[in-house]
Amino acid sequence: PVHVEYFVDHKQYYNYIIIHILCYMISVFLVVIPYDIAYILEIRHITALFTIIMLRLKKSSAMLDSFENPKYVSTIVDDKVRIAIAEVIVLHNEAFEMINLIEDTNNVGMVGILFQNMILFGACPFLLSVHLHRPMEFNRYVLMFILINLHFWVIFTHGQLIIDYSSAIFGSCYEFQWYYLSHKSCNLIHTMMTRSVKPCEVTGGKIFILSMESYGQMVKTGLSLFTI
């Protein structure tokens, strides 16, 4: 618990203060926590799709290992590989749609949460310095500082996962033995490679990218508020 000053007579407005605290705590459990959990699950679902895509590309490429010369790749095998690649492209498009859905649904909420946390992150060091001689209050603000930093880390780490996994798709396409395939099948691989050149990104209200680089900048900005 953190001490909160209401600037009113606590005895006279005790019931109102308790109601306000209860409403705030309930809103945290019913809004903020489910919001973060939904965000994490959506990111994990997308990374799972990217993992399935890479595994299927690897499996399709393994079908060509028995052919030492591209001239000897049978039409049947080429057709099977082309169908497998087409299915992978469908999954790839689904992953893109999921990322766009996260962007559209989390824009406003993500910006509000991150800016609020950044302000609190900058205020915590100041509060720690003020309560150095009050161990109980000091320990409370230390815990608050750690939890805010942990929340920052979770949000930006999952944004970084999208960048890493989407970038890995390009490497999987590059390692694919596309030179054994027909021109029609090669075009499918080239299409995926073209779409994977630029990694996918999740942003906070189109203002900043959710990545570990942005995490470092946000922490630096938050701490700079304390020095000011």
Image (cartoon, rainbow, N blue to C red):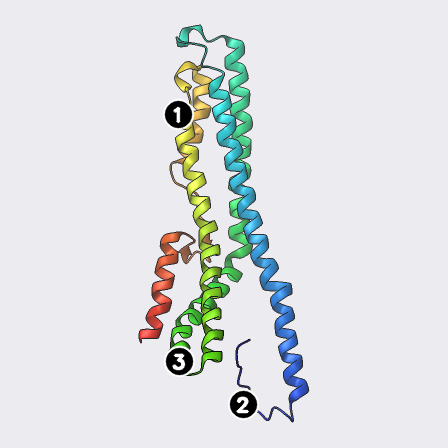
Q: Nearer the viewer, mark 2 or mark 3?
A: 3
Say which quadrant the C terminus sits in: bottom left
Q: Which residue is mark 3?
A: 132
For this view, does 182 lie left or right of residue 88?
left
Name the residue rendered at 44%, 9% in the picture.
Answer: 67
Quick check: marks 2 and 3 in contact, CB under 8 Å?
no
Q: Residue furthest left?
A: 227
Say which quadrant the N terminus sits in: bottom right
Viewer-proximal residue, 38 or 198? Answer: 38
Viewer-proximal residue, 4 or 213? Answer: 4
For this view, does 53 lie left or right of residue 128?
right
User: In x, y percent, where is residue 34?
Assistant: 61, 58
Query: What is the CA distance from the residue labelled 3 to the residue labelled 1?
Result: 57 Å
User: In x, y percent, where is residue 104?
Assistant: 53, 53
User: In x, y percent, where is residue 19?
Assistant: 67, 80
Going by the numbered disc 1, the residue's amino acid type is Glu
Q: Secondary structure at mark 1?
A: helix
Going by the numbered disc 2, the residue's amino acid type is Phe
Going by the numbered disc 3, the residue's amino acid type is Leu
